[in-house]
Image (cartoon, rainbow, N blue to C red):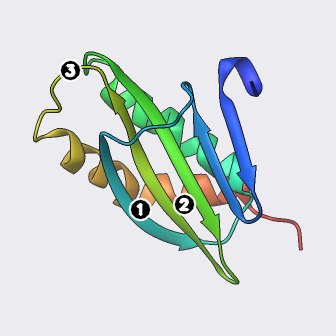
Amino acid sequence: MGVKGWHILKDGDRLILSRHIPARFDVEVCTVLPRANLLRLAHQIRQDMWRALQRVRGFSPVVEVRAFEEEAHVRAGGRVFGAVSPATAPQIADILEDTANRTRWLRFAREER
């Protein structure tokens, strides 16, 4: 168990942040960002997803980030206990593609090189 009840699973250049183990993606959206601190990036994305989707009954955010040379590949979504609304994935995509969100996440998660 990691920070405040969140599981943080690290495997090389891959990190998964989830409330439940095993982490499960009942709904997911992917994006690519410039490389940054994986844990900080995952927490920022998780927070914004939760703020937007906390009224989705049974939703529990999961964020997977994989580090490559200059990129961070993000898979965001989560576990949903019950039916997944068709509107959920587009909501997550809007969060991930929002320019202001991406700028804030990267400013917070900038790696010291």
Identify the secondary structure beneath mark 2: helix
| Outermost bottom residue | 69
* N-term-proximal mark, 3 vs 2: 3
Residue at the spot x=74%, y=24% of the render? 1
Q: On residue 82, which mark appears?
A: 3
Direction from residue 66 to residue 51 in the image, left or right: left
| Outermost front residue | 22
Direction from residue 32 to residue 109 in the image, left or right: right
| Outermost left residue | 86
Q: Nearer the viewer, mark 3 or mark 2?
A: 3
Q: Which residue in the structure is indicated by mark 1? A: 99
Look at label 3 and name its amino acid: Gly
Picture quadrant where residue 6 is located: top right
Picture quadrant where residue 52 is located: top left
Q: Position of residue 68 (x, y in %)?
A: 66, 78
Q: Which residue in the structure is indicated by mark 2? A: 103
Marks 2 and 1, how far apart at CA: 6 Å
Look at label 2 and name its amino acid: Thr
Question: Contact, CB < 8 Å: mark 2 with mark 1?
Answer: yes
Q: Depth check: 106 or 65 in front?
A: 65
